[in-house]
Amino acid sequence: MRKILLYVTCLFLALFGLYQIGMTVFAEQSGSSPESGSDSRIKTAYDWLVAKGTNYGSTDAADWDSATTYVWGTDWNRIMEAAAWEPDGSATAGDVPSGFTFYAGNGNRTQKTGTLFQNQALMDYDDTNCAGNNAESATPCVAGDSEYTGEEGTWTLTASGGTAVSVTDNAVTVTLTSNKVYKDNWTKLYWTDGNAGGAIVDNEFAYVDGDDRTNPTGNSCNFNSTGTANAFCDNQDPLSAYVEDNDVSAADFCLNLQLDADNADLDDNGATGVETDWRLPTQKELMQAYINGAANNLPTPVGNYLSSTESNSTKSYAYYMVMSTGTTTVLLKNTSGNVRCVRRN
C-alpha cells in the first residue's frame, strides 16, 4: 500500500511539473526554442514597448496589432493595450487652467500642465491707455502707452469681406459696420463687429417667465432661438404694452442676423453660407470678452454695448457694457445703445 501511494504521489508530482514547464514555455515562446528568445512573447512585447520610447509614446510606432500580427488572445491584448496607451486629445497648455495637469497629443504620454489664465494671475498692473485699438494693426499700442496686455487671450479674425449684413424690421434697417467676425480662443465665442451709425438700437425685450432664464417660452424673448425673434424681443414697453414699436431692438437684430462666422463651407447644421444662431450676449460674456482683450482685438469697442441680462430689481432696466474700458451698469431698456452679436460652435 505504501509503495502504491508513493508511486501515485511521484506520478502526480511529475505530471504537475510537466504542466508548469508547459505553461512557462507557452508564456515565454511561440513556435521555437526558449533559449533563442527570438519568438518569446515577453521578449516581443518588451521590444515593442522599447520601440515606443522611454515614454511609451515619445515615438509614433505602430499600435499593437492584435488582429493579424500578435494574435495572442484577450489577456495579452489587454496587457499590451494598457501598457501602450497614448492620448489622442487636441488640448494644449493654453486650453487648460493654470496648475491643472492633463495628457494630450498623439504619441505623447508626458503629463502636461495648463497655463490658461496664468498671465492674469501674475499681472501686476493694467490701464486702458491704448484700449480701443484694433489688433489688425501690427503695433496696436503706440510708443509711450503702458497698458499691460500680457494677460489677454488670443483672438482670431475668422470671417471678413463682402457687404455688411443688415436686419430690417418695421421699415427700419440696422447694419453691421463690417462683416468681420473674431473668435475669442479662450471662451471659443464668435463676436461680430458693432452696428453702423452709432447707438441706434434699443434693448427692449420682455422676460415674463420668472426664473426661467435658460429657455423662456410664451410671452417672453427666447435668446436661444435660431434665426427668428418674436414680438417680445422688440417691445415698446417691456412692463405692460407688449406691442412692437417702430425700431429694431438689440435682441431682435441678433436673433434675425445671418452672417458667416468662419468662412466655412458648412455650418453646424450642414448648411452652406451663413450661421443663424447669433444672439445678444449676456453681461458676463461682455465682461469676460473685455478681460480676455476685447478692447485691443475687436473693432469699435467704444460705446455702450447692450446685453440680454435684465436688472434683478426691475424689468424696465438691462445691463450694458463699455468694451473699451470694462464699465458696466444698467440702462432703461428704451435707451439707445450699440449691439454686438455672439454665437458659439
Image: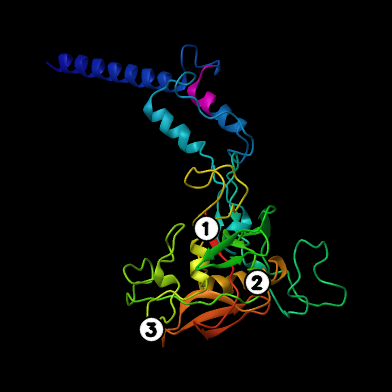
Question: In terms of sequence position, does the residue under pointer 2 or pointer 3 come before the other?
Answer: 2
* Point 74% across, 75% down: residue: 131
Q: CA distance from mark 2 to mark 3?
A: 41 Å
* Point 56% across, 79% down: residue: 320
- Which residue is disc 1 drawn over? 344
Question: In terms of sequence position, does the residue under pointer 3 or pointer 1 come before the other?
Answer: 3
- List x then y, in percent, for residue 169: 51, 66
- List x then y, in percent, for residue 149: 73, 71
Question: In terms of sequence position, does the residue under pointer 2 or pointer 1 come before the other?
Answer: 2
Give the quarter of the image for residue 206: bottom left
SS type, badge 3: loop
- List x then y, in percent, for residue 185: 62, 58
* Point 22% across, 19% down: residue: 9
Select label 2 or label 1 by which is in front: 1
Amino acid at circle 3 = Leu
- Which residue is disc 2 drawn over? 120
- Colour mapping: rainbow
- Which residue is disc 3 drawn over? 239
* Magenta stretch, residue numbers: 39-45
Around disc 2, counting alpha carbons within 10 Å, would you say few (fewer than 14), some (14 to 19), or many (20 or more)? some
Residue 52 within the segment the image draws in magenta: no
Q: Among all residues in the image, which is located at the extreme top?
A: 32
SS type, badge 1: strand
Decide: is 96 above or below 212: above
Q: CA distance from mark 3 to mark 1?
A: 31 Å
Decide: is 175 above or below 62: below
Decide: is 268 above or below 85: below
Amino acid at circle 1 = Arg
Q: Among all residues in the image, which is located at the extreme bottom?
A: 313
- List x then y, in percent, for residue 179: 65, 58
SS type, badge 2: helix
Tell whether label 1 touches label 2 (CB within 8 Å): no
